[in-house]
Image (tube, rainbow, N blue to C red):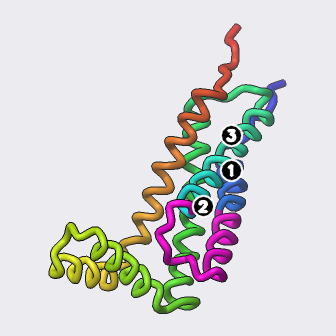
Amino acid sequence: MEESQPKTGKYSLNFGLILGLISVVFGIMLYTMDAHTSQDPANTVISIVIMVAVIIWGIISFRKANNGFLSLGEAAKLGAGIALVAGIIGVIYTMVMANVIDTDFALKIAEVQKVKAEADGVMTPEQIQQQYDGTINYFWISYPIILIFNIIAGLVVGVIGGLILKKVKPTY
């Protein structure tokens, strides 16, 4: 009688929901502190640490359920799957933020970028204005970019986690 192997899809969904929920809570926390449009590197680092921690947690949980065995492919699938589910939740949250909660969200982000570009002094005023207008008019392009970035980052974390945690089933 063969033991049933756990499914990567189930773990991807469950841990993706956990990561998505934690990310939304972090986003709401930033919103309540009026820091949701800041480009503070600390916010990015915290988000990445949360992502890595939840993906590794998901990989370890899958490995435990799989009698201690884990292939590199399973780890990569888990990383990308968890990140995909969390990315979808993140895109939905961003859409709600930009269209319902803070309708000036894109405008605020464009303003932060404009101030930073002016302070850097690298771009001409025309280029800065063009970037400002582009951010406002094409903010919708950030939605697929968020999703693509999440999947790639999840895949990388999954592969690295898989390289560290992999244990192949012996063949007899």
Q: Main secondary structure of the magenta part?
A: helix
- The magenta stretch is 20-42
Q: Are marks 2 and 1 in contact (CB under 8 Å)?
A: yes
What residue is drawn where x is 69% and y is 66%? Answer: 21
Residue 57 in the image: x percent, y percent? 72, 44
Point out the image quarter for the C terminus. Answer: top right
Point out the image quarter for the N terminus. Answer: top right
**Nearest to N terminus: mark 3 or mark 2:** 3
**Nearest to N terminus: mark 1 or mark 3:** 1
Q: Please tell me whether mark 3 sits on a helix, a strand or a loop.
A: helix
Residue located farthest toward the right when viewing the structure as drawn: 1
Q: Please tell me whether mark 1 sits on a helix, a strand or a loop.
A: helix
What residue is drawn where x is 16% and y is 75%? Answer: 124
Amino acid type, mark 3: Ile
Depicted 47 relative to depicted 34: above or below: above
What residue is drawn where x is 69% and y is 19%? Answer: 169
Residue 52 in the image: x percent, y percent? 62, 47
Residue bearing mark 3:
59
Q: Is residue 45 magenta?
A: no
Residue 164 in the image: x percent, y percent? 62, 27
Q: Is residue 52 left or right of residue 68?
A: left
**Quarter assignment of residue 141:** bottom left
Amino acid type, mark 1: Val
**Nearest to N terminus: mark 2 or mark 1:** 1
Residue 155 in the image: x percent, y percent? 51, 44
Q: How many marks?
A: 3
Q: Is residue 36 magenta?
A: yes
Residue bearing mark 1:
54
**Quarter assignment of residue 34:** bottom right
